[in-house]
Image (cartoon, rainbow, N blue to C red):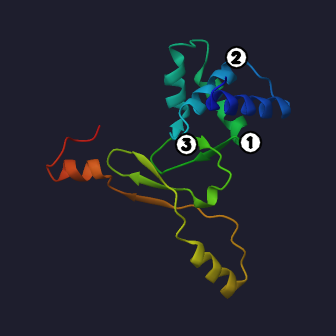
């Protein structure tokens, strides 16, 4: 029996094939690495480093191109956290309720799955007639580990 990761990666490969893009072993390896780390916010460099040992034929340019294609066909979302490289995550069926907490010290990104802005959206629609289709929330601050490290109660973040 195939794992859920394999099943989802296979669906992504089928979407790639259906969009008239080539399905190469390198692209399959990139897709599999993303689905093997579904809760990570990976940069192209992260994926390249993760794959390069087992797949020395994969170039960083191939990783970038593949990630852009996967974002174009809706498999991934390209996001930026203001800390440099774009990162990628799997597209969710409801991105509306998916937000990020970004530690300004160690760079850790934590997902926050509750949407507290829905009442605000309803008020905006009622007051202005503007139909909100989506929103994105990024909160910047210190994660618990970095807070502990700064207060002397823990080890410093990497």
* Pointer 1 or 2: first along the chain: 2
Residue 61: give x, y in percent of width and height: 63, 25
Q: Kindly check if marks 2 and 3 are in contact, taking CB atoms under 8 A apart as contact.
A: no
Q: How many numbered discs, if any?
A: 3
Q: Tell whether 98 sits left or right of 103.
A: right
Vertical side of 108 occupied by 63: above or below: above
Q: CA distance from mark 1 to mark 3?
A: 15 Å
Mark 1 vs mark 2, foreground winner is 2
The residue located at (74%, 42%) in the rendering is 72
Label 2 to label 3: alpha-carbon separation: 24 Å
Structural crowding at the residue carrying mark 3, measured as other residues with C-alpha within 10 Å and reported as few (<14), some (14–19) or many (≥20): some
Q: Residue at x 33, y 44 (%)?
A: 106
Which mark, by number, is residue 8? none
Left or right of 55, for residue 139: left
Q: Is residue 108 above or below residue 21?
A: below
Q: Which residue is mark 2?
A: 25
Q: Is residue 22 left or right of residue 7?
A: right
Residue labelled with disc 3? 86
Relative to residue 150, is residue 31 depicted above or below?
above
Give the quadrant of residue 32: top right
Viewer-nearest of labels 2 and 3? 2
Residue pointed to by mark 1? 72
CA distance separating discs 1 and 2:
20 Å
> Is mark 1 in CB contact (under 8 Å) with mark 3?
no
In percent of width and height, residue 118 lies at 59, 73
Q: Residue at x 79, y 34 (%)?
A: 15
x, y percent for residue 48? 54, 24
> Is residue 36 shown above or below 101?
above
Relative placement, left or right, of 29 versus 156 is: right
Q: Secondary structure at mark 1?
A: helix
Find residue 23 and report its image quarter: top right
């Amino acid at each position: 029996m195939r794992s859920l990761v394999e099943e989802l990666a296979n669906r992504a490969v089928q979407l790639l094939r259906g969009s008239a893009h080539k399905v190469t072993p390198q692209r399959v390896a990139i897709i599999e690495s993303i689905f093997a780390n579904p809760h990570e916010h990976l940069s192209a460099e992260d994926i390249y480093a993760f794959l390069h040992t087992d797949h020395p034929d994969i170039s960083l340019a191939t990783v970038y191109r593949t990630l852009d294609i996967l974002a174009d066909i809706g498999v991934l979302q390209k996001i930026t956290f203001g800390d440099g490289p774009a990162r990628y995550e799997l597209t969710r069926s409801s991105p509306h309720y998916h937000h990020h907490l970004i530690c300004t010290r160690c760079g850790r990104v934590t997902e926050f799955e509750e949407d507290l802005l829905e009442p605000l959206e309803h008020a905006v629609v009622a007051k202005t007639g503007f139909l909100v289709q989506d929103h994105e929330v990024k909160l910047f601050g210190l994660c618990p580990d970095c807070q502990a490290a700064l207060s002397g109660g823990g080890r410093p973040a990497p």
